[in-house]
């Protein structure tokens, strides 16, 4: 038999990670809840992963709040992150019925109003509450194909695992590099195009600057472009915590055609205002540890 080299074994390691995630998703809910709490303690209290970054983001966003109030937001946001990890693991193996019982979309008729007339829709969400459950439940409830932009993971096994689990109920994860191409290819089909739109553009990418949470902030302009190309209405997806492991989702119309192509990215501005409103309502439910403000606004922007 041929000798298995170390290099060959390393190539198989990503597959092991996907297998481990799959096995963990089968753990009982109570075990996963305990795992989420341990992850919170480890990340927040021991490793202190990105705590300085998160604390700085919160202080800059809420200069009017007391240090004690900002500290409470910081700690609760990490506790919610631990819950998110446990919930996501459970959700990747949960049934459609179980997910729909935990995430209630209050007004799905807003989407069917447009898709029933042959119009695609653009859905804009954020790293708020549990965005993994949001895509899965939308696939169950909305009864329309959902193309969801995502950032591929560096580890192949994890990336393949996440794509497969996110696609279980009709979601179609598409890498962000090819998302616009896929939109153009499907422009005559009736679909929902879902974007978690609070990522930060790279320094050399086109962006829109606005005041957001007391700071100059860069946003992607892709959602605005997609909506105008497809002549599609844009809907903000507001997810709100309704108890442990339970959420309500309210769909809010941001814009609908006809659009003025020369008016600038007004859809992105409306998204920023809506997201800011939701964050101020429940600041600990946003993901403060991502690098939203990693560079400053240029003087010419």
Image (cartoon, rainbow, N blue to C red):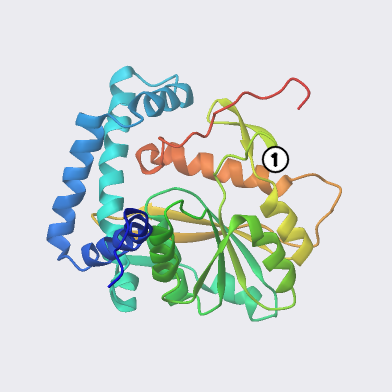
Q: Is residue 203 visible?
A: yes
Q: Is residue 15 left or right of residue 163?
A: left
Name the residue carrying label 1.
Answer: 205
- Residue 205 percent across, percent down from the top left: 70, 40
Q: Is residue 224 above or below residue 297?
A: below
Locate the C terminus and report the quarter of the image it occupies: top right
Please tell me whether residue 162 is drawn above or below residue 139 in the rendered image: above
Q: Secondary structure at mark 1?
A: loop
Q: How many marks?
A: 1
Task: Relative to 159, say whether 94 is above or below.
Answer: below
Quarter-wise, where is residue 106 in the image? bottom left
28 left or right of 267 in image:
left
Q: Is residue 271 above or below residue 284?
A: below
Q: Is residue 67 left or right of residue 295?
A: left
Residue at screen point 31% across, 51% down = 84
Residue placed at 53% from the left, 30% from the top? 213
Give the quadrant of residue 37.
top left
């Amino acid at each position: 038999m041929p000798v298995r080299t170390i290099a060959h074994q390393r190539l198989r390691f990503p597959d092991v990670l996907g297998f481990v995630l799959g096995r963990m998703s089968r753990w009982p809910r109570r075990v996963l809840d305990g795992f989420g709490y341990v992850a919170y303690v480890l990340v927040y209290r021991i490793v202190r992963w990105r705590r300085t970054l998160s604390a700085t983001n919160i202080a800059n966003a809420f200069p009017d709040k007391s240090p004690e109030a900002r500290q409470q937001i910081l700690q609760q946001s990490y506790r919610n992150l631990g819950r998110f990890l446990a919930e996501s693991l459970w959700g990747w193996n949960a049934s459609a019925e179980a997910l729909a019982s935990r995430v209630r979309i209050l007004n799905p008729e807003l989407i069917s109003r447009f898709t029933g007339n042959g119009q695609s829709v653009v859905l804009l969400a954020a790293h708020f509450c549990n965005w993994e459950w949001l895509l899965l439940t939308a696939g169950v409830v909305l009864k329309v194909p959902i193309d969801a932009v995502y950032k591929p993971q560096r580890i192949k096994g994890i990336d393949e695992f996440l794509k497969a689990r996110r696609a279980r109920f009709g979601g179609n994860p598409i890498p962000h590099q090819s998302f616009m191409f896929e939109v153009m290819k499907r422009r005559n089909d009736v679909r929902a195009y879902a974007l978690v739109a609070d990522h930060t553009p790279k320094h050399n990418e086109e962006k829109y600057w606005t005041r957001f949470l007391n700071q100059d902030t860069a946003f992607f302009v892709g959602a605005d472009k997609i909506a105008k190309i497809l002549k599609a209405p844009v809907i903000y997806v507001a997810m709100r915590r309704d108890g442990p492991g339970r959420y309500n989702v309210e769909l809010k119309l941001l814009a609908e055609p006809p659009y003025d192509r020369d008016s600038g990215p007004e859809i992105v501005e409306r998204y920023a205002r809506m997201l800011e409103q939701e964050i101020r309502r429940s600041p600990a439910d946003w993901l403060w540890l991502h690098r939203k403000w990693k560079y400053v606004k240029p003087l010419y922007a």
